[in-house]
Amino acid sequence: MTIQKIAAGEVIENPASIVKELVENSLDANAENIVIEINNGGKSYIRITDDGDGIPKDDVSIAFKRHSTSKLNNINDIYSIMSLGFRGEALASISTVSKMEILTKTSGSEAGVHSHIEEGEVISSDIVGCPKGTTMIVKDLFYNLPVRKKFLKSDISEGNQINDIITKLVLGNYEKSIKFIRDGKTILHTSKNKDLLDTIYTVLGKDFANNLIQIDYKDSYIRINGFISNNNLYRGNRGHQYMYINGRSIVNSAISKSIENKYKSLIPINRFPIFVLNIDIAPGEIDVNIHPTKQEVKFINKDRVIGTITNCIERYLLSSCS
Ligand code: ADP
Ligand code: MG
């Protein structure tokens, strides 16, 4: 049990990492509508409700076991992975450091199941009526790890980190409806089937949405689309640089730096451009396997990726200035 709890700490640092893992599961399950509710910065209560595929009744207890995933059929699938999860660690980890409840129903079954999970084990299960989809409830984070609990930040600070994670998820999945309720108050509610610019407007505000240039580039190797700053829109840090590879939010300082250098060479300003960039590339061209939280992605052909992105940005920036 101790080993499990320590290992859990690597994936589950704080409430925001729980929200990220659970919403990614909803997205992997083809949900169209996702509701995220938190209380006290997610420390006491997190609930994620989706209308996705659900989990078959007999698979519920398996889903909470370490290294159980329904997303890889064999080890070679790791090279063609399109789902956000694949390690089968999140539910196992979260359930060892909190009190969890799941309510889930697949479209094929008549009734759903409602289970309580503690210390990674299903401790009760009832058959219930519920709509298709899954609700996950996470209560009392780190109730059994007082030292880790003490290191959580204030409710406001933990809640703000959840807000940042949700912003990333919403911008990367603008065709879905996502609702965020914080301490009983609806903070964000995006509708289904809107476009990226509408979503930027809703999430980041009109000053952003009105000062962006749309880019859309495609060749046989890569597709790059999204929005980049025009010459009026800059920030003091990288806080508003959103990058997605095949729908996965990533951080890649080499790409950010090359984009920033390109801006500096074209527009004499020493601040940080803003962008929301979706990069689509064959899964075999990336390696998402380097870090458990999967934020940093390695490219097989990094120079080609960076070269194409920066050339593309240069072309769009120059044509918008002329
Ligand atoms: P991973 O996402 O890496 O497969 P997780 O521990 O996050 O591992 O989830 C374990 C399994 O539980 C998933 O592979 C999936 O089959 C199932 N699962 C988890 N959340 C959901 C959900 N919201 N809807 C449907 N299935 C889910
Ligand atoms: Mg997962």
Image: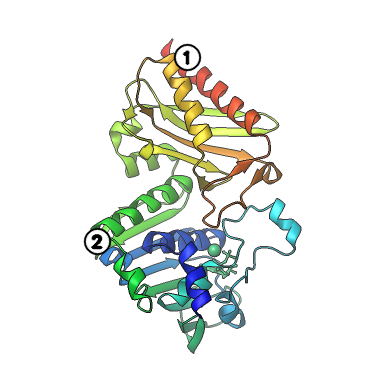
Say above or below: 263 vs 109.
above
Image point (75%, 63%), residue name? 74
Q: Check if mark 1's residue and mark 2's residue have beta carbons within 8 Å.
A: no
Give the residue at mark 2.
Answer: 154
Q: Nearer the viewer, mark 1 or mark 2?
A: 2
Picture coordinates of residue 178, whole percent (x, y): 40, 56
Picture coordinates of residue 73, whole percent (x, y): 72, 65
Callout 1 amino acid: Leu
Is 4 on the left or on the right of 190, as rendered?
A: right
Q: Quick one: 18 or 82, which is closer to the camera? A: 18
In the image, the residue with mark 2 has its CB under 8 Å from the nearest atom of ligand 2: no
Q: Quick one: 90 or 130, which is closer to the camera? A: 90
Q: Residue 34 is drawn in which quadrant?
A: bottom left
Is 227 on the left or on the right of 53, as rendered?
A: left
- Of mark 1 and mark 2, the one earlier in the sequence is 2
Say which element carries label 1. Answer: helix
- Neighbour tally class for label 1: few under 14, some 14-19, many 20 plus, Cα within 10 Å: few
Picture coordinates of residue 115, whole percent (x, y): 47, 84
Image point (43%, 60%), residue name? 17
Q: Quick one: 247 or 128, which is closer to the camera? A: 247
Q: Is residue 56 visible?
A: no
Distance from the alpha carbon under mark 1 to that under mark 2: 45 Å
As drawn, the label of residue 318 is: 1
Image point (38%, 36%), residue name? 238
Callout 2 amino acid: Ser
